[in-house]
Image: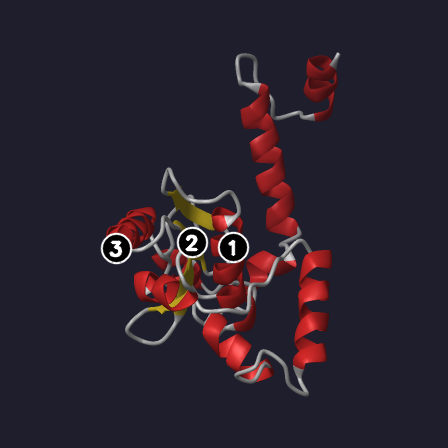
Amino acid sequence: SRMLALVLTCPGLRAGVPVASAEATARAAWLAKNPSPWEARVTPQAAQAASPSVFHATQAPGNPWLAPGRPMLTLEAADEMSSVALREATAFNPISVCVLDAGGRVLVLKTMPASSGLTADFAHAKASVCIGMHCSSRELRDKYQNDEGIGPKMPQLLAMGTAGAAANKALAPFPGGVLCRDAAGVLVGAIGVSGAASDEDEHCAI
């Protein structure tokens, strides 16, 4: 059996010592003779500052293996943002609100009961524009379209929409999507609103 094999190959194993403890002891002995490249890169100062169970990247700024932490939009903040947007829409048509984090993951999606069926999808698409392009959905439209909705860069915008759809990332290049940044200008998320007129959507998002 595995226990018998372990007893025969580990002379230091005593009766009553758990197998897991013996394996941990053997592993520690092996690592002492063969340190891993990753462990060799962690400085003693960083190891001393780190938690015994979790190595925090922010505590080792010189470690090339770990990226420093960055601000994150909390679920509570996203919920409050969406609720404020819904309150702003009381004088407009029913809307949907979508809040994404900096990685494009949905934190909150709220839809007013009387809103049309696609408003939630459009709200998500507007917020996705902000995360994917690092600009508001209005900025994306104004960069590639003129006041008449056409222009020499229109084919490029259509190609971007096609590429986004192929990657399952719908783009909605019209007002209603706004970036969220912290006081230092770091991107922490985006909010998209759809259901009212575009300018009204943007008003609710802001």
Give coordinates of residue 6: x percent, y percent. Answer: 70, 21
Q: Earlier in the sequence, mark 2 or mark 1?
A: 1
Q: Are marks 3 and 1 in contact (CB under 8 Å)?
A: no
The residue where tag 2 is placed is 195
Decide: few, some or many residues near mark 1? Use Cα within 10 Å; few <14, some 14-19, many ≥20.
Answer: many
Residue 95 or residue 15, whichever sits in front: 95
Question: Image quarter for residue 40?
Answer: bottom right
Residue at point 52% right, 63% down? 66
Q: Are marks 2 and 1 in contact (CB under 8 Å)?
A: yes
- If the image is split into quadrants, where does the C terminus sit? bottom left
Decide: few, some or many residues near mark 2? Use Cα within 10 Å; few <14, some 14-19, many ≥20.
Answer: many
The residue where tag 3 is placed is 91
Using the numbered discs, state the Cα–Cα distance from disc 3 to disc 1 in whole angstroms.
20 Å
Q: Earlier in the sequence, mark 3 or mark 1?
A: 3
Residue at point 49% right, 70% down? 137
The image's mark for residue 5 is: none
Secondary structure beneath dot 1 equals: helix
Residue 166 or residue 52, whichever sits in front: 166
Question: Amino acid type of disc 1?
Answer: Phe
The image shows residue 1, relative to residue 6, as above or below, that is above
Q: Are marks 3 and 2 in contact (CB under 8 Å)?
A: no
Residue 163 or residue 88, whichever sits in front: 88
Using the numbered discs, state the Cα–Cα distance from disc 2 to disc 1 in whole angstroms.
8 Å
Using the numbered discs, state the Cα–Cα distance from disc 3 to disc 2 in whole angstroms.
12 Å
The residue where tag 1 is placed is 122
